[in-house]
Amino acid sequence: MTNETRHRRQGADPSKKRTEASKQARRKKRRRRQLRLIVLRFGALAVLLGLFIYLIVGNPLGIESINKSGKDKNQVGEPTTDEIDNEVEEDLEAKRLKEMELEADRAIKESNALVLGYYYDEALARLDEFDAKYEAEFGKNQKIQEARAKLEEEISSLTPFGAFSSVEEVHHIFFHSLIADPKKAFDGDYKENGYNYYMTTVDEFKEMMKQMYDAGFVLVSIHDLVEAVEQDDGTIVMEVSDLLLPPDKKPFVLSVDDVNYYEYMKGDGFADRIVIDKNGRPSTEMTLEDGSKVVGDFDVVPVLETFLEGHPDFSYQGARGILALTGYEGALGYRTNDPSSPTYEEDKATVIEVAKVLREWGWEFASHSWGHRDMDKYGYDFLVSDTNKWLDEVGSLIGPTDIYIFPYGIDIEDTGPYDGPKYEYLREKGFLYYCGVYKAPWMQYTKDYVRMTRRPLDGQAMLQFPERLQDLFDLEKVIDKTRPPLR
Ligand SMILES: [Zn+2]
C-alpha cells in the first residue's frame, strides 16, 4: 500500500457518520482486501522463487513430479511435460556418462599405480572392476580397452628374476645403523675407526639408493625369492618362486644389522630408537646437542620410506628391508632386556606397537642372536640357550620370524649343505632363511632352508675394496668426503 492510497482512503468522506454495522462491514472488507493483497504478494514471490530455483538449481523441489501427474498446468512459453521428461532423461544420461568417464580415468590411474608397485593381478582386477560396473550399460570403454592392452603386453614381457637369469644372482646388501651426524661419529675418539669401517652415513645411503634405482634395482623380500610352502602333512618345503619382473629390473634384498641403538653409540651422531611419527609412519628419534629430541630421517627405515614415496617402483609389492635384532640391550632402541628399568613394561608395550607398525609397512625381522657371539666358535649348548633367550625376550615382542642373520656374518657350517645339530636346532625353532656375509652374491637352497650371503656396503667396502662395489655405484658420488682414512 502506497502512502498516497492510504491517505486517500483515510481521507474519504471524513465528515460522514456511519452506523456501527456499516463500519464493521467496511472494516471486514478492508481486512479482506488487505489479506488478499498479502496472499497475492506472497503468491507472486513464491512463483518467482520457484522459477528461480527451477532455472538455477535444476528442479530440486519435485516440480517434475507435479508435472508428471498433470496437476500443474503449463503456463505460456513453458515446456510441456514430455519435453521436460526428455530433458531430465537426457540430463541423467549425460550425468551418468560423465560419471563413467571420470571413473574410467580413476580406474586407469589406480591401475597404473598398482603396476608401479608390481601388483599386476590387482592392476588387471581394477580394470575388470570398471567393466563390471559400466560395460552392460555403455559397452566397452575405449580408454579402458587401451589400458588393458598395454597392461597385458607388459605382463607378457615379464620374466623370472628380471635381468637376472636365476635366483642365485639376486643381490642381498646390508648396513648397520646409519651415521646421521658424521661430525660426531668422526670426531677422533677411540670409536671413530670402528664407525669408519662398519657404518655408512645417511647421505651415502641416500646416494646408493638413488644410483641403484637408476640402474634398475628393485627391492624385494627374501620371501619373494624362495617360498616356504606348507604341505598337506604340515611340513614345509622351500620352493623357488618365479618372481616375475620387467626384463630390465634387478631384484635385491636389503637388511640392517643390530637395529638396537646400543649404549656405546650415544652421542656419536646416531638415532636413539625407532618411533612411530605423528602421521603413523615408522621413523627415528634422535637427541640433539641441547638435549632436545627430534623425529626424522636419521636411519635406514625412514630414509628408505621417504625415498619410496618419490620412487614407488623401487619396491616390489610393498617389500622393505629386514631388521636384524640382538637381545642383550633390548630391541629397536628400547631397553627391554632389563626388568629393573623403571620403564620396562612401558618399553615392552612400545616395542610391540612399533614392531606391529613396521610389519604393516612391509619391514621384516630377523634374529641376530641374543648375545652377538661367533656361533661357529661357540658350542651347541650355547647356541641353544642364546636362541631361546632371544625368542623369549625379543621374539615375544616383535612376533615370529624365520630369518636368522649370523653375528659377524659367520656361518655355523661350511658351504656344503647344512647337516649339523646347530642347524637342526635353529630349523626346529622355525628358522628357514640363514644369512652370512660374502663379497659377492651367493645362495644355496634345499627343500629345507635357504642360505643367502650379503654384501656389506660400509666404509671398509667403499675405502678398502672399492672394486667390489663397481657393479653397483659410482663411488666418487657416494663416499662422504669427511670420512677419515681407514687406520
Ligand atoms: Zn651384528
Image (tube, rainbow, N blue to C red):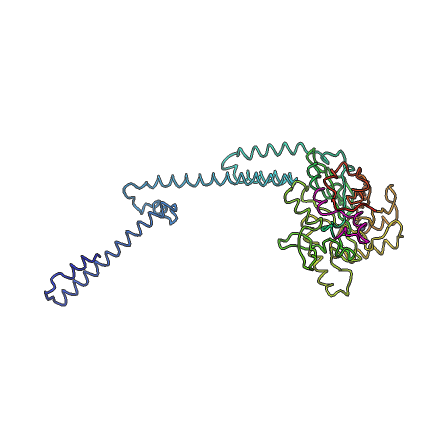
Q: Residue at x 29, y 40 (%)?
A: 77
Q: Position of residue 469 (x, y in %)?
A: 78, 39
The residue lying furthest to the bottom in this view is: 20
Residue 442 in view (yes/no): no
Q: Residue at x 78, y 60 (%)?
A: 337
Q: Relative to 238, is 281 on the left or the right?
A: left
Q: Position of residue 176 (x, y in %)?
A: 76, 49
Residue 127 in view (yes/no): yes
**Vertical side of 240 occupied by 367: above or below:** below
Residue 192 is covered by the magenta coloring: yes
Q: Relative to 352, is 439 on the left or the right?
A: right
Q: Quadrant of residue 205?
A: top right
Nearest the eye: 151 or 447:
151
Nearest the eye: 191 or 1:
191
Nearest the eye: 131 or 467:
467
Q: Relative to 436, is 364 on the left or the right?
A: left
Q: Main secondary structure of the magenta part?
A: helix
Q: Position of residue 389 (x, y in %)?
A: 81, 57
Magenta segment, which residues? 184-208
Residue 313 is covered by the magenta coloring: no
Q: Quadrant of residue 470?
A: top right
